[in-house]
Image: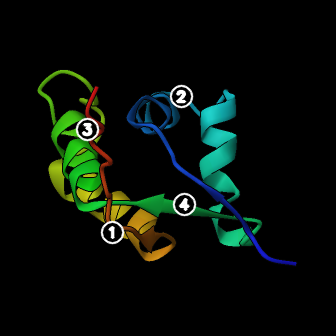
Amino acid sequence: MKPVQVAIDTNVLVAALKSRHGASFRLLSLLPDGHFLPNISVPLFIEYESVLKRPGLLDHLKASEIDDILDYVLSRSSIREIYYLWRRS
């Protein structure tokens, strides 16, 4: 069975790293199972890094630990390019 392709919003990562008691943490803990495949773009990854490293947001994690988490998420993801369709009125 093919994995379900998903996009993980930044707030899901933040919630998962703040608490082990919610759906966001559960979602990330299922990454190794391969039931779903996160789709990620370069701008989204940069957003992840920027937000997760904001001072005061995740004080219990060092920058190097956040890098390790992001590296893992990236290793389990499919990198996608975003194409925008601009329409004229």
Q: Which residue is mark 3?
A: 52
Left or right of 38? Residue 4 is right
Q: How many marks?
A: 4
Mark in the foreground, 2 or 1: 1
Q: CA distance from mark 4 to mark 3?
A: 18 Å
Q: Nearer the viewer, mark 4 or mark 3?
A: 4
Choose the circle earlier in sequence order: 3 or 2.
2
Q: Nearer the viewer, mark 2 or mark 4?
A: 4
Kind of residue at badge 3: Leu
- Describe the element under mark 3 as helix, strand or loop: helix
The amino acid type of the residue labelled 2 equals Ser
Of labels 3 and 2, the one closer to you? 3
Instruction: Residue at the far left: name it.
Output: 55
Give the residue displayed 65% in from the left and 54% down from the top.
29
**Residue under numbered circle 4:** 38
Query: Crowding near pointer 3: few (<14 within 10 Å), some, many (20+)?
Result: many
Which residue does the numbered mark 2 point to in the structure image? 19
Residue named by callout 1: 71
Distance CA(mark 2)–CA(mark 4):
21 Å
Q: Earlier in the sequence, mark 2 or mark 4?
A: 2
